[in-house]
Image: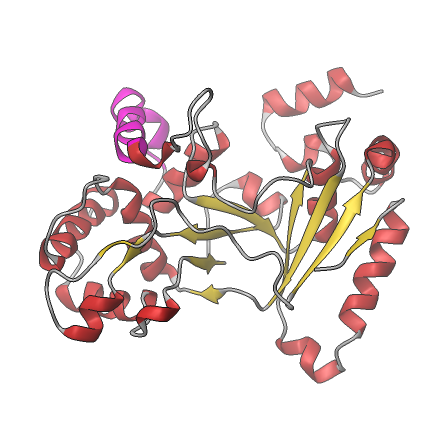
């Protein structure tokens, strides 16, 4: 993936426009563009639950279920207005708990802000994705989110796995998941070809969260559970965690473009973005964030 250098906002917009205009008008109507901003260009495109703990080689994945349930148990009132497990995971991510969600946005200027907003001594990066992800609908996304509350050591039978996912879904959505719902979702989420195991899915649906709306946000929802062998063979115990770690998004795809922001240009770009109404006070619409924005405003 070629990575062009960005010096200012207008330079960035021109390069984005050039990328869009490489397609004819009819193709542009069909293409979806999403962006991810990193304040350190060396970072991998992976969910936080896949990152290593401080002073350890082990990722957060092995304790994902225990830590999420611990927060739910300790602060139940924080989640009483969240109507789905996916919304709860979004909130947990906002407060810093590692999750299997990766934030992306349909607004390139929002991604540019996040590429410049921290790590002042490091180069930032904006990655643009063009029709790269398999999109899933509301109920399928909610079923996929239930994987975050499965124990790391999975049950031995697929029928038991489906039963556990149904129980998790019912607990967090106050209604039952039919056998037909889960069978249909599994066939959509996991391809039958075991050599094409899908590991991440685009969720571009409704999230009842002001921050996500203001950031024009969507999510990649990751999974590390491979059941394609079960679907393909008809056997009940032919599945596993395909990888010990959740997969990293391929940033070198021909459908990806990268833009490097030199660390020396970060501050001036943030000033330009603020003039356009892109700053922490608008992207994080809560009282604490807005007061911090006013306090640190230069």
Outermost residue, top side: 295
Residue 245 is inside the magenta segment: no
The x and y percentages for residue 13 are 83, 56
> Which quadrant does the C terminus fall into?
top right
Where on the picture, by quarter, is residue 32? Answer: bottom right
Closest to the observer, 169 or 4: 4
The quarter of the picture where the N terminus appears is bottom right
Q: Quadrant of residue 261?
A: top right
In the rendered image, the vertical position of residue 245 relative to residue 29, given as above or below: above
Q: Is residue 174 left or right of residue 10?
A: left
Q: Quadrant of residue 128?
A: bottom right
Looking at the image, the residue that sits furthest to the front is 57
Residue at (44% x, 51% y) in the render: 247
Residue 230 at what x, y percent from top left? 18, 67
In the image, residue 105 sits, relative to residue 179, either above or below, namely above
Magenta stretch in the rendered image: 63-81
Which secondary structure is most common in the magenta stretch?
helix
Left or right of 146? Residue 137 is right
Percent x, y for residue 173? Answer: 25, 47
Give the residue at x 52% y 54%: 249
In the rendered structure, the answer to whether residue 149 lies left or right of residue 161 reads right
Q: In this figure, which colouring scheme has been used for the structure?
A: secondary structure
**Residue 75 rendering spot, x and y as whole percentages:** 32, 22
């Amino acid at each position: 993936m070629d990575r062009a250098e960005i010096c200012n906002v207008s330079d960035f917009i021109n390069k984005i426009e050039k990328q869009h205009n490489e397609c004819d008008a009819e193709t542009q109507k069909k293409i979806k563009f999403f962006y991810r901003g990193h304040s350190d260009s060396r970072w991998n495109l992976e969910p936080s639950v896949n990152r290593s703990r401080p002073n350890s080689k082990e990722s957060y994945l092995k304790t994902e279920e225990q830590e999420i349930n611990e927060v739910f148990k300790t602060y139940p009132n924080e989640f009483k207005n969240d109507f789905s497990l996916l919304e709860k995971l979004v909130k947990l991510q906002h407060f810093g708990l590692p999750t299997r969600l990766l934030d992306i946005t349909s607004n390139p200027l929002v991604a540019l802000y996040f590429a410049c907003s921290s790590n002042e001594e490091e180069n930032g990066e904006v990655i643009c994705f063009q029709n790269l992800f398999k999109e899933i609908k509301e109920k399928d996304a909610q079923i996929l989110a239930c994987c975050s509350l499965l124990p790391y050591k999975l049950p031995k039978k697929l029928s038991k796995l489906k039963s556990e996912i149904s129980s998790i879904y019912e607990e967090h959505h106050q209604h039952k998941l039919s056998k037909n719902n889960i069978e249909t979702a599994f066939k959509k989420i996991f391809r039958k070809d075991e050599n094409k195991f899908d590991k991440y899915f685009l969720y571009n649906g409704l999230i009842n969260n002001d921050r996500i709306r203001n950031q024009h946000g969507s999510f990649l929802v990751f999974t590390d559970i491979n059941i394609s062998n079960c679907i393909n063979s008809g056997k009940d115990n032919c599945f596993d965690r395909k990888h010990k770690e959740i997969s990293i998004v391929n940033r070198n795809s021909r459908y990806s473009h990268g833009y490097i922001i030199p660390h020396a240009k970060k501050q001036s770009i943030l000033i330009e973005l603020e003039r356009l109404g892109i700053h922490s006070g608008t992207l994080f619409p809560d009282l604490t964030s807005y007061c911090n924005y006013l306090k640190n405003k230069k």
